[in-house]
Image: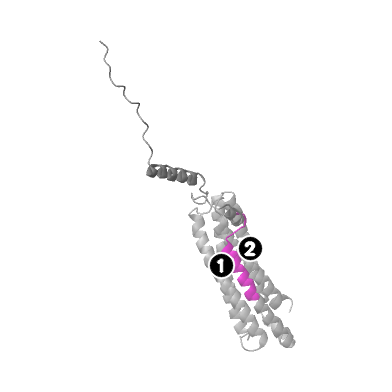
Amino acid sequence: LALNLPARPAPRACPVSRRGRSGLTSIKSTVSAAETISPLALGDPPAAAAPAEQAESARPGYTGMWVGITCEFVEFAVFFIVYFIARWSYPDVFRAGAPRLWTLGGLLITMVMLTSGYALVRTVLAVRRDDQRGARLWMTSAFVVALGYPLVKWLEIQHNLAAGVVAGNNAFFTVYYYLTINHFMHSAWGILGMLWVLVRVWQGAYRPGNPKGVESMAIYWHATDMVWLMLFSLFYAFV
């Protein structure tokens, strides 16, 4: 017997509520925003900083050392202006005072400055080649030779006092002591810097990829060399 059963209605799709459609739209918006996040937000370094970093790595020494050397040159430029004003105002005093200085002492200081500067250059070259033994040898030589400066300076002062070269006696002696003592102070800071670099060299801290510390030391000492050559010319050689 055939049974006449009522047909079952076809299942209807569940209608998406207004809140559900809003949620899907929010998810799509979030995914789209994530795809367009800039590399800066993900922590990548900005491209504009790359040239500055490359310039810092290509320049020998640290930027701060170059700024310090510039300040030193400005300082001594003012001192040299004072020197030339005094020399123009008292030409006879300058001509009479220069022969009373210990010229040999000035020449010895020049040799000490230049020789220690050469040893610093060889230290930088050895570090760049990763020659640690050579770097220790040359850095030790630079420091030991530089210690000759305070020794010669002490002997020079003893000679000057015996010869009556006393600050305050005349314009030449006053300017002489003012400029040379200032230079000695800058050199003393350089010698202390050499001691620090020497310790670091013996610790193996400087490598071909990290030579800036020893480069900065060499740059500073050479700047002090240049100032001394000017002082030697103005006080000992061409007065």
Q: Quadrant of residue 3?
A: top left
Applied colour scheme: one colour
Residue 20 appearing in the image: yes
Residue bounds of the magenta highlight? 57-76
Label 2 belongs to which residue? 115
Amino acid type at image mark 2: Thr
Residue 22 placement (x, y as % from top left): 41, 45
Residue 182 placement (x, y as % from top left): 59, 76
| Closest to the observer, 217 or 138 | 217
Prevailing secondary structure of the magenta residues: helix
Residue 136 placement (x, y as % from top left): 54, 55
- 3 relative to 39, above or below: above
Q: Quadrant of the C terminus?
A: bottom right
Label 1 crowd (10 A; few <14 / some 14-19 / many >=20)? some
Q: Tell me the distance, in whole angstroms, between the alpha carbons under discs 1 and 2.
A: 14 Å
Q: Tell me the residue at 61%/68% (across/down).
A: 69
Question: Magenta stretch containing residue 71, yes or no?
Answer: yes
Question: Magenta stretch containing residue 181, yes or no?
Answer: no
Q: Tell me the residue at 71%/81% (across/down).
A: 84
**Disc 1 on helix, strand or loop?**
helix
- 115 relative to 9, above or below: below
Q: Which numbered disc covers residue 190? A: 1
Q: Quadrant of the N terminus?
A: top left
As drawn, the residue found furthest toward the top would be 1
- 119 relative to 100, above or below: above
Amino acid type at image mark 1: Gly
Left or right, 143 with reference to 86: left
Residue 151 placement (x, y as % from top left): 56, 72
Work out whether mark 1 precedes mark 2 in sequence or the reverse, and give the earlier one. Answer: 2
Q: Which numbered disc covers residue 44? A: none
